[in-house]
Image (cartoon, rainbow, N blue to C red):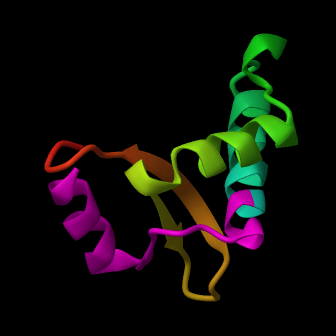
């Protein structure tokens, strides 16, 4: 994961959010849903907004939201990293 982060930082603005706010989660949901629709994923993978907010709340102490933004500050991609102690 560290190599992916370093590589992204060379070309784009990378944001780490250890305590995602509603806006951060909404951005993640928008990107996630867009990706699932783009790959024609089964409806099973289109989770509700409540699911995501509950997920982030439940795992808030073991979660990092990583977002890559373009030059204008628009989110291009986002990923959730789960960690426990020193393990990612």
Q: From the image, which quarter does the C terminus lie in? A: top left
- Classify 29 as above or below 69: above
Q: Is residue 15 magenta?
A: yes
Query: Relative to residue 60, is residue 9 drawn left or right?
Result: left
- In depth, the one of 43 and 38 nearer the eye is 43
Q: How many marks?
A: 0
Residue toward you, 50 or 14: 50
Q: Say which residue appears at 49% left-offset and 50% top-offset.
A: 79
Please identify the quarter of the rendering in which residue 69 is found. Answer: bottom right
- Residue at 27 percent across and 63 percent down: it is 5
Residue furthest bottom in the image: 72
Between residue 85 and residue 72, name the one nearer to us. 85
Q: Position of residue 34 (x, y in %)?
A: 77, 42
Residue 59 is situated, as x and y percent measured from the top left of the image, at 51, 45
- Image quadrant of residue 73? bottom right
- Position of residue 16 in the picture relative to residue 52 (left or right): left
Q: What residue sits 60% from the left and 67% below the top?
A: 20
Percent across and percent down for residue 47 are 79, 28
Q: Is residue 65 left or right of residue 53?
A: left
Expressed as whole percent of the image width and height from the top left, the position of residue 19 reads 53, 69
Q: Nearer the viewer, residue 83 or 3?
A: 83
Q: Is residue 54 above or below residue 73?
A: above
Asked if the stretch drawn in magenta spans residue 20, the answer is yes
Per the rendered image, the range of residues in magenta is 1-25
The residue at the point 72 percent across, 30 percent down is 36
Which image quadrant is residue 11 in? bottom left
């Amino acid at each position: 994961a560290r190599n992916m982060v370093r590589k992204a930082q060379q070309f784009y603005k990378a944001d780490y959010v250890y305590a995602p706010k509603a806006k951060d989660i909404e951005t993640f949901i928008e990107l996630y849903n867009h990706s699932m629709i783009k790959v024609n994923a089964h409806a099973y993978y289109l989770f509700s907004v409540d699911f995501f907010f509950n997920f982030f709340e439940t795992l808030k102490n073991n979660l990092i939201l990583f977002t890559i933004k373009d030059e204008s500050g628009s989110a291009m991609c986002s990923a959730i990293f789960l960690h426990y102690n020193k393990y990612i």
